[in-house]
Image (cartoon, rainbow, N blue to C red):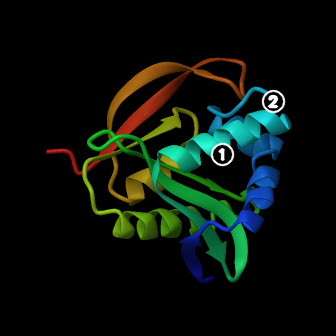
Amino acid sequence: MEIALRAVRDSDVPVFRRLMTDPEAVRMAAFGPEDPHDRAAFTAHWERLRDCSEVLRTVVADGEVVGNAAVYGVAGEREVTYWIDRAYWGRGVATAALRALLAEVTERPLYARAAADNAGSLRVLRKCGFCETARARGYAGARGREIEEVVLVLGAS
């Protein structure tokens, strides 16, 4: 399977919205909106991501849009985020996309966060060199309660 990152096109955004309404994916990601079908909440989330991202890319697998990946935040505290179509989970797409993003964004350190029970995402982050630095509790809108999250870092001295 050929995985590539490219600039986000307006036509990608409806695909991202569809991906971000998959109930299992939303539950696993945890830190999304309480109602993933709320168009206004999705639009606000997407605009915020566009506004604060250093790099924002569409993930393409064999020519199909299958997700997005970004580096966002202020210098010295930037975080990575990604969302991959559940149909592509366990196939190396997230790892390949994150590696491509990290090759493009050479700034370090970079941070990441994941729900402590999101084994797949934690595995991807660790494969890409991120190391756990802390655990915290945070409100997970998609689950409607506070949960444990893992904070990871890449390239900290």
Packing grade of label 1 (10 A; few <14, some 14-19, many >=20) is: some
- Of residues 124 and 138, the one nearer the viewer is 138
Q: Would residue 1 appear left or right of 79 to someone viewing this image? A: right
Is residue 26 visible from the viewing direction of this image?
yes
Q: Would residue 46 appear left or right of 116 to someone viewing this image? A: right
User: What residue is pinned by disc 1?
Assistant: 46
Q: For marks 1 and 2, give the CA distance.
A: 15 Å
Q: Earlier in the sequence, mark 1 or mark 2?
A: 2
Place of residue 65 in the rendered image (x, y in percent of width and height, measured from the top left): 71, 70
Q: Is residue 98 above or below residue 26?
A: below
Instruction: Check the picture and name the quadrant holding the N terminus.
Output: bottom right
Please tell me which residue is depicted at 35% across the width and 69% down the height of the picture. 103
Q: How many numbered discs, if any?
A: 2
User: What residue is pinned by disc 2?
Assistant: 35
Place of residue 117 in the rendered image (x, y in percent of width and height, measured from the top left): 57, 34
Q: Is residue 12 above or below residue 32?
A: below
The answer to which image quadrant residue 145 occupies is: top right
Please tell me which residue is depicted at 47% across the width and 62% down the height of the picture. 98
Packing grade of label 2 (10 A; few <14, some 14-19, many >=20) is: some
| Contact (Cβ within 8 Å) of mark 1 with mark 2 | no
Please tell me which residue is depicted at 66% across the width and 39% down the height of the picture. 45
SS for callout 2: loop
Q: Is residue 49 above or below residue 148?
A: below
Place of residue 5 in the rendered image (x, y in percent of width and height, measured from the top left): 54, 72
Is residue 36 visible from the viewing direction of this image?
no
- At label 1, the amino acid type is Trp
Q: Which mark is residue 72?
A: none
- At label 2, the amino acid type is Asp
Instruction: Check the picture and name the quadrant holding the C terminus.
Output: top left
